[in-house]
Image (cartoon, rainbow, N blue to C red):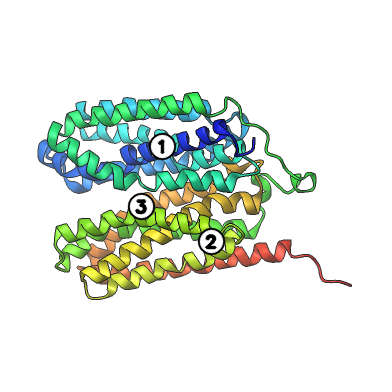
Amino acid sequence: MRLSGTRAWLIVWGVAVAQLVSWGTQFYAFALYVVPMETSLGWSRTELNAALSIGLLVAGLVAVPVGSWIDRVGGRALMTGGSLLGAALLALWPMIGSLWLFYAVWAVLGLSMAATLYDPAFAVMTRTFPQDYRRAITAVTLVGGLASTAFIPLTQFLIERMGWHDSLFVLAAFNVLCAAIHGSLIPRAAPPAQRAPAADKGEGLRAALAKPSFWALTLSFTLNALTFTAMIFHLVPLLSDRGLGMELIVAGFTLIGPMQVAGRILLVTFGRRLSMGGVGSLVILAYPVVVVILMLPPSAATLFSFATIYGLANGTLTIIRGVIVADYYGQRAYGAINGAITMPTSIARAAAPFLAALIWQASGGYTPVLWALLVVALTSAACFWLAVTLERRRVRPPAAGS
């Protein structure tokens, strides 16, 4: 199917709206429930945040089978079921009074996240629009990038008006809406990707695993996930320790979402004819830059500089990550290959807050944490450059007479 006509765009924008809701309710909203649950149930902040890490870990562990499922039979049943599962678990959440049951709920929520967030959506877009997957993925991320901007204030409003228990039933209802979108719009079976016959033998998960560029790219995205997750989860205590007020910190956080969307719009406007590898080689440098900015004396200027650069980079890198897999390793096994990259990145995302906390606890401050993140970010950039260089050498035609 080409990305033209009302039906095609209805699929894309429907999935995009579902991404906004899924990210907003299953990921970003979590942080707003920590304090009221801490007060209501007496569980510590560390104990509560461990639940999100468990969910992210499970999501990473099942990423490959989820992607393989979409490669074989499409994403309609998987994403519809994932949204319904998310709705049921969000509705169950306020009824739980045991920490271990709370962990169990979030372990199963990891399955829901694995079936509903960007990676399965990218696989569906790639399989449904094999000739226009770049535009389809970009459109999905343009809307999905506003998840934090939309759902952080909405969730806080619901908590203040209804209490944290009842507000979760509203979030659950949003996921039922996502299930309706997925069930009615995603094609029942994935159409076969249109591939050049000569490229067929070189596609597939096994072929990707045999390429050094795959391992370099996977390591780059894994280290990048470690960097940005640690920064985001520790940004509030880091800036608070350095004397910035909470209103200013929240304002900085609010800026990240629109900047992500702005970055994606810039990529759509100016990057249509550019290679994702070339653009990514520049974008990946933004992460060590934002770590350096956090090392500077704290002020409104440094905070908003961080939020702007981080948002622009994270917005464009989401598209690059979704597109470059198909560009480098083909579309036939996109779901499985993308899942193989997602598995270690999700594990890194789950571990990052705790690793940063261990460094902070051992050193008594955030300066060593930032130095560690700078090294990780620079290594991530080096691995990305290596992957792009290896792919350019692989596809470069041989010189005449050789």
| Secondary element at tag 2 | helix
Q: Secondary structure at mark 1?
A: helix
Q: Which mark is residue 136?
A: none
Q: In the figure, is residue 285 to the left or right of 230?
A: right
Q: Nearer the viewer, residue 388 or 257?
A: 257
Alpha carbon distance from label 3 to label 1: 29 Å
Q: Closer to the N terminus: mark 3 or mark 1?
A: 1
Query: Residue 112 falls in which quadrant of the image?
Result: top left
Residue at the farthest bottom position: 297
Residue 253 is situated, as x and y percent measured from the top left of the image, at 27, 56
Amino acid at the residue labelled 2: Phe
Question: Which residue corresponds to mark 2?
Answer: 270
- Residue furthest out toward the front: 5
> Which residue occupies 54% across, 64% down?
279
Q: Which residue is mark 3?
A: 351
Q: Is residue 171 left or right of residue 197?
A: left
Residue drawn where x is 18% and y is 28% of the image: 166
Q: Position of residue 40 (x, y in %)?
A: 11, 36
Q: Residue 138 in the image: state x and y as whole percent.
A: 51, 48
The residue lying at 42 percent from left, 61 percent from top is: 313
> Which residue has dot 1 on it?
17
